[in-house]
Image (tube, helix red, strand yellow):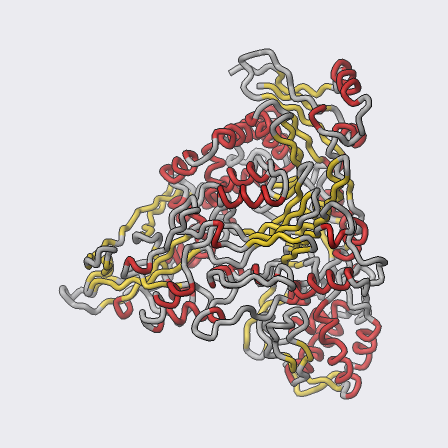
Amino acid sequence: MSTNILHRHVPILTLLTVAVSLVLSGCSDRDNNDAFFPPTDTDTATTYSADIQRTEFGIPHITARDYKGLGYGVGYAFAEDNICSLARELVVASGESMLYLGTEGNMASDVFYTWYNSPARRAEFLAAQDPEVIDAITGYAAGYSRYLRDKGVANIDPACANAEWVREITIDDLLIVYGKANLRGGLSNFVGPIVAAAPPVQNSVIGSSRMRSVEASDPVVDSAPAFDMNTINIMNGGSNAYAFGSEATGTNSGVMYGNPHEPWEGVQRFYEFHLTMPGELDVMGAAQQGQPFINIGFNKDVAWSHTVSTAKRFTLYQLSLVNGNPMKYNYKNSAGVFEQRDIEAVPITIKLPNDQTLVRPIYLSQYGPMLAVDKVNGALPAWGTSNLAFTIRDAASENPRALNQWRSMNKAKNVEDLVTRMKSTLGLGFVNTIATDRYGKALYADISTVPHVTKDKLEACSTNAGPVLGALIAVDLPALNGSTADCEWGDDADSPQAGIFGGSNLPSLIRDDYVANSNDSYWLSNPQQPLTEFSPLLRRRLVPFLGPNAVDGVPLLMRSRMGLTQIADRLSNKDDLGGNTFNLDNMQEVVYGNRSYVAELVLDDVLVNCLAEPDLPLSDSTDTINGTQACNILSSWDRRNNLDSKGAHVFREFWSNVKFDETTDKLFKVKFDVNNPVNTPSGLIISDNTRTALGDAIKFFQDKDIALDASLADLQYVIDAGKNNEKISMHGGLGREGVFNVAQSRNRDIVRDGVKSITTVNVDGTYGPIINGPTYMQSVTFDEQGPVVEALLAYSQSADTTRPYHRDQTRRYSAKDWIRLPFSTGEISKQAVGNKIQLRE
């Protein structure tokens, strides 16, 4: 290997400038980026070649002649801004957190990921990649490693400088990261139950059928995170996306808004960049760490975003154990022949400090890993009880096509072409897609990996297999009888993967007016054209969609209702923004409005009662508290979560105290109406619960000496560690309140009336620092010259507190000040920051 230019920062060459000027003469400033020339190396020994020009806010524009060069540029730029984040994820994904991360290590995680990311699985994953994808990820690893060599481990981000776990990487390391990322909608939620799964121990009496479970504390099991169904059901998410077609824009082009919400710390960090390979690829947007292609973004014809889908990516299977042998189960094969099949114990060795190791088995059935289902729900039976055991199969874990999918999507020509590309590859693991194009079409699709389990199969394979399967389905875990081939997943002719639905059996919708999604199911992407008749596995809740009285819809999330209400208010000008169409400017006003849908829905009822009966009960006292002042403040509150909103915190704490499941209608006088789903349920039932919730909220802030009319800017913030921990005030609220822009600090367990719940308010009465909220937000339309894009990455490009791009966009987000993204050569030149980096290796 030869290195032509070790690390040369050079100005744009005079000859290149002249050439660009010649090409651009007579052309618009925003014409096709073919004028953005790739490197023109003549040295045949050069393996990787890329040019990187950063623009304002640290956005790298990578130009290359091939996919290796594109990946090389992205890997280098990302490492420059976020090397510690990816280096740490490599440690976790490889199952070495206990070895390297000290008290932050986790034994259960190490056992699980050491098993899952086996050499055999990585080889299978690599074999499934397109040649161009292999080139791109090979380049990414080389670019990351090149940065580390150039900089030296002692001179990188101080958060991980000189750490022994920061090293050069290979494509094999990135395969581990991709393997872990695949599991987000499935197995990664079950790490604890998988690692805890163990057969019962035989009694010392030989031949006895009596068995006992494994006893005592187990440090591996104890280290695992508790199972949380809210994560699978996306109850605490915040992603939103709008796509408007020509009927809603009043032009020939579409307009879209994407607002994915992810944790602001750790593995799901988005990074903005622009890829140009003339004649092949010209796409800009953001991708999560380690990804060489744009995940959410736009090209000259199409813009798209993603929200996490409600679809279940897995099913549990109930096994009928052979009597007296917990390592065998009964199975009737497709020929009707009864067999006894083995459960395999796979020993997994993880590394510990001081040259120590730990060996732990993972148990596998034909479907996948065994589960300690009692760790999923304490009312469910342990392995061996009533000769039952449970296992899980995850469709996304069998899907190696995500990178192929995003490369294909990056090249889409219109929304119809985008749908075709998604259906042919079927590589998205856990997300909906919302898109628009320059031709004025709007698309919603949940074309992703979903187990091929129809309503009929789910009913037939659960109702006759005992009460445990019914109990699992009641808590929204799809569960099937694993004792017969009749309950194996089905197949579609148009599916590239065995056992999942093909594109023809997955929901999608193209319209001329609009589509929207805020983490609810496919059903109501547009209220004028509800989608129905798809598998219950695509819905958040299972029970309502089963049986002879299956429904078409259930109550929406409050955030979904807010999203659809905002659209209706704009198209009718109820929002007083003028006109009745969407454009980039008024759409930005709408989505940054920070309206509280729940306040609009219930606050009038609360105030009428409070002002009539101001002495409110408290949950921990026989005393009462007078609510007159608080309710006068809430009467004046603008019912928004903007920085200058006064009283928003009191309503938030009140609603957090209310015993409310937002996908039911039990709290309301007007029950859910499937024919009026955006406006029902409604009419809050005033009760001891709601009155006590308000009393407790008032007392909480009084006890903390926080004014009831405090502005949200004084309470909700992000920390800028690069500027002496300065606080940046943040607008936004909670999805549970129906606030579109979710801003959530760390959850804190509390107990009310003997019931454990969570709150996001700190013990000092503030909300911060924000750790979950908007990430890469883009607002996109098109004109005759190309895409017109204003965007923000809410937490900014760099996690490195010493970089200038650590919180610069965060301040812009706080001020609701969008950034115009440069796409053409001329736009990039105008926003260029620093010299172009020319990398050759």
Q: Is residue 559 above or below residue 293?
A: below
| Total labels drawn | 0
Residue 221, percent from left and from top: 40, 57
Residue at 33 percent of width and 60 percent of height:
487
Visible in this render: residue 113?
A: no
Q: Residue visible at 27% across and 51% down?
A: 344
Which image quadrant is residue 526 in?
Answer: bottom right
What is the quadrant of residue 829 in the picture?
Answer: top right
- Relative image position of residue 473 (x, y in whole percent): 43, 68
Q: Relative to 510, is 636 on the left or the right?
A: right
Which residue does the image show at 78% across and 46% down from the upper left?
818
Residue found farthest to the left: 207
Instruction: Say which of 26 and 807 sits in front.
Output: 26
Location of residue 830 with respect to 382 vertically, above or below: above
Image location (x, y in percent) of residue 330? 23, 60
The answer to which of 574 and 289 lies nearer the viewer is 574
Q: Residue furthest top?
A: 43
Residue 659 visible (yes or no):
yes
**782 sits left or right of 462 in the view:** right
User: Residue 667: x, y in percent?
Assistant: 62, 79
Q: Nearer the viewer, residue 15 or 82?
A: 15
**Quadrant holding the C terminus:** top right
Q: Compared to 717, does 124 lie above or below?
A: above
In the rendered image, which quarter is residue 60 located in? top right
Work out whether residue 464 or residue 730 is closer to the camera in this orientation and state it.
Answer: 464
401 left or right, relative to 14: left
Identify the residue at image location x=37%, y=42%.
356
